[in-house]
Image (cartoon, grey):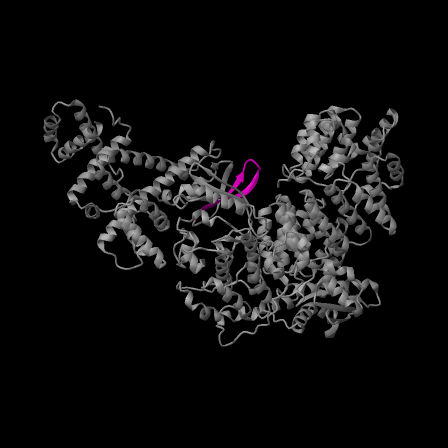
Amino acid sequence: MPASSQQRLTQLLCEWRGGNPAAFDRLLPLIQPELQRLAHRYMSRERPGHTLQTTALLDDAYLQLADETPPQWKNRAHFFAVAAQLMRRLMIDHARQRQALKRGGGTIRVALDESAAVTQTRADELLALDEALENLATFEARKARVVELRYFGGLTMEEIAEVLKIHVNTVTRDWTSARAWLRAALSGEDMNAS
Amino acid sequence: MQAKQWKNCLEIFEAAIERTCGERAALIERTCQGDEALRRKVELLLKYHEQLGDFIAKPAFHIAPELLIDDPAALIGRELGCYRLEAVAGRGGMGVVYLARDERLGRKVALKLLSQGLVAPEAQVERLRDEARTASTLNHPNIVTIHEIGQVNSTLYIATEFIEGVTLRERMARGTIPPERACEIARQIASALGVAHRAGIVHRDIKPENIMLRPDGLVKVLDFGIAKLMEQESGAALPSVRTQTVTERREIWGTTGYMSPEQTAGGKVDPRSDLWSLGVVLYEMLAGKLPFPNGTPRDVRQAHATIVPAALRKVVDRCLRKNPATRYQTAEEMLGGLGETKEASVHPSAASASKHYAAVIALTALLLGGAVFYAGRHTPANRADLPVGLETSIAVMPFENFSADQADAFLADGIQEDVLISLGKIKRLRVIARASVMDFRGAGAAAKTREMGKALGVSHVLEGSVRRAADRVVVSVTLIDTRDERAIWSERYERTLVDTISLQGELAVEIARALQKTLTPAEASRAVTKVTENPDAYLLYLRAREAESRKDNREQLERAAPLYQGAIDLDPGFALARARLSLCASALVNWGAGARWEEPSRAEAEEALRLQPQLGEARLALSHHYLWVARDYDRALAELSLAVELLPNSAEVPLTAAYIYKRQRKYNDRIAALHRAEALDPRNRKVLGLLACTFRWIRHWREAMQSGDRLSVVATDGQGCYARWTRTQDEFHFGGDLIALKRFIAEEIETPSSTNREWLDVARYETAMLERDYVEAARLLALIPPEAFSLGPYGTAAHSKAFHAALLAVASGADAATKERALELARDELEPRVGAIGTDKPEADLAVAYALLGRKDDAIRAAQHAIEVTAGPLDSIEKNHMSSALAMVYALCAEPDKAIALIEQLLTLPVEMEHGAIYSMSLTALKWRWQWDPLRSHPRFQKLLAGPEPKTVY
């Protein structure tokens, strides 16, 4: 990576940490190719019984982006935090795109093949989850963040604790109750009933 | 309120699950304090907690990575706007490219969906789209045509012409590219850049993935003006932020390896930045790797000194200068630099040449003429600046037959052609194709070589003679420099007939040596390979070639085929004879000679290829099989792309491409292919004739006239008169008045020849009809023999004389009985011809006759049936021609609205436009032909005639 892009990445990470939301938008295109490349690799390696740690992938991404200098843990955790958010944004964007095609395309003349249908279902589920997560965040921002880091970023409980500066037991508790709430919300329960 | 309660609820839930089941009820009872709603919520959570299973346990990334990468195949079969996605054509850093069908226009397009998140902020999108739209107005054969830039929901897409072929990246994966081909590719790219730069458009992303190589040799640059769509505010292109050369990465995401230093630094880019990128591409084509493996432009000179052939080193050097001010300043300058390399005589420095690249350097010893001199010209008006490649180009004149027996003429012709074919396989030599030199048969005296050289634009002429006595053959050849008419090499070979077989190869090698050309081992081996070891087989082969070359018609082909078969029977390993037999068979299928030729068309080509995988003629034969027999145009093009490298000098290759493009209704591509064929075979009448008629179909009258002018120069005798008349008709359509027609007649009357008589009378008759001078028309019609109408040199069947007579009777206002008699005669002549294979025009004529007889229903039915049975895709030019007949029937049957609606539509479509055909659909024809008179009082028709002629959409 050219020196200028590295500096740019570091600078944007700093800005984003410093509370500038615009920096996130600019990080996205910078990191997206890396994440997508990893997704490709992940898909091509995938076989039964073999699970690749997302963090291992992200580590790789981070190392690539940070130009192979051993990163400070703090930076790394923060990178993961960004990556999780980016990952969420990317996946949701793509799921939306898929829905747009389904709707915007009008009639689908050719029956979808099986894998496309599965993907479509996943896209729908993902969008529903995203929406539920948004709801959860309105009253339990931290729990929602835990889910984001865990589900979209693939971070371990310890890593989440590090990023959020809370005890790992708290992370576990947040995770459990957030899951139960989301599960209920996604099961069609009326979460607004009083 | 809800939020607060949920927060509370979650706290209770968390406390509850840490308790045992027994303790939970009490805890809930206590904490909810009788709030039933809260209690229900806690219980709900507990219930779902039990059912969690692996809900969101695995990261989303593991479950649906295809969502992240947006598995392109998942969208196949979907529709986006008016496009149906049919297949994934490729993917790049900017998104996925699909092969799609435009449902409105029924054409294939390449549809690029731009990845979200890579696109610049919304506010800029509109401005950037404007720029891309500007780019889409660029009209140049080396620039891919952008059809549309649009957006559905948040997905931005770009629809462009779909190009058959491979990307330069794919081609390079097969190995480095020979310097002369690399030079040609660079020239075509530079030519495209020149046009874009003059229009103020910088490409910004020149790289091998954005360069398409078409089977006919044409290079297309993709994605003009699109790179900017993907840029961020800073002006630095971001989609590919890396300079890595890892193949995987490059394939998927593109690379910055091609970006100029100023572009990488995020600075302002201008045309010179594109020239840097082109320099990198040129370097990579030659060296097989990037010039800056470490991303540091510093070490470029040293690096490429050892790899890039010296002739091109200067060009690469100028492109890859860090300071833009010291690079080439314009694409034209670079074109000049590339042109100079043709003249440079380069000797590899042995010390610097690594073994691996020694061959490349040897091959580059001279970059010249041949393939490089076509840089994609669309407008023949520029023809004057066609570099004629005077340095090293050769015309092999027809060999004279000095044998006592004139029947041995085939031997002279055969040897000449074989020498020509062998030379044609040498890439750095431009060899004028056979059709262009046959005009000079018998002109052999050396005194004329300067003239011939000039006429053909060649530096050298090879003359020869053949004398046969029993089984001894004496071949004498002389190589002459046309500039000073000096014989630079001369040789006499006395051989047995058996040894004559290998003569052409030896001659090719000797000639190359005399011209100071170095042959690559592959070229030398291709040149000296004996086509067969069997002299009798060779003789039969030569006879077949002779039969075929006389005239391109069914009769000659049917004579040639058994001769080839005979040669194959004598030598089953005679690959070239098999390839030729296959070509013959495919042509016979096309001529309607029957299904029995279908099998040899395929089988012989495949067998030839099996025997000799590197035989260009075999590839060509397979391409023809797919074209004429299997009608699988994609495969025909794929085979053709393999043939083009083996037969770099063959005009047959681009000519074949032209045939394919017609069937795919790609008229621009067809024109480009024909221009390329013309460059290789400048005096080929078929090429020039096809070029003129293609322009005519799309109503580019001016270009049609220019092609016709060139055809008139090379066409002789009756053909010349026909060519001039056809060209004059284009001028008539273009100018809208009869001046041109009258001038033609006056000129031809002044210089009568024995052969222009018939055509001249036809021309005068047609002009008289347009003038409505029916007395004169009747006089002329009586003079014209019936066959003059139906048999042109190009084999086009026009209206019969009886039909003309009927039209004349009606137009001239003859009495009812005369009219009826003439029409019935025409009808009786036409009716039996309806339904014969390949002749749907009689039915259209019959429809008009019915209309004039007042049989409205029969007329419309016949015209509609003529459209229906006309072969070809829905909107082929032939079908459109038949639709024009239907419009005329409507006009004559008092259905003006239907007629005008159809005319309005047809004027925007490509149509067949034959000389003398009354259905020619142009504004001028509508204005002059009496058949359209019933429409003249209609305001809609008047408005249409007031012009301008609508643009033909194709």
Asked if the magenta segment contains residue B366, the reply would be no
Q: Nearer the viewer, residue B419 or A60?
A: A60
Q: Which residues are magenta?
A: B94-112
Position of residue B33 in the picture relative to residue B666 (left or right): left
Q: Quadrant of residue B417?
A: bottom right
- Residue placed furthest toward the bottom: B351
Q: Residue at x 78, y 27 (%)?
A: B850
Q: In this image, B422 relative to A149: left or right? A: right
Q: Nearer the viewer, residue B223 or A51?
A: B223
Residue displayed at 82% across by 68% down: B402
Residue in front for this viewpoint, B788 or B562: B788
State which quarter of the image contains the N terminus of chain B.
top left
Task: State whether the magenta stretch is mostly helix, strand or loop.
Answer: strand
Residue B888, by quadrant, is top right
Query: Where residue A49 sits in the image (x, y, percent)?
Result: 29, 47
Q: Position of residue B283 (x, y in %)?
A: 49, 63
Q: Which quadrant would the C terminus of chain B be assigned to in this image?
A: top right
> Can residue B283 be seen at all in this image of the molecule?
no
Q: Nearer the viewer, residue B653 or A81?
A: A81
Does the magenta segment cover residue B108? Answer: yes
Compared to residue B15, the image places residue B556 above or below, namely below
| Spot occupied by residue B253 in the image (x, y as percentages of width and height) | 42, 52
A151 lies left or right of B8: right
Q: Is residue B752 left or right of residue B893?
A: right
Residue B679 position within the rendered picture, expressed as x and y whole percent measured from the top left: 67, 57
In this view, B389 is above or below B255: below
Badge count: 0
Whether residue B761 is visible to the viewer of this picture, yes or no, is yes
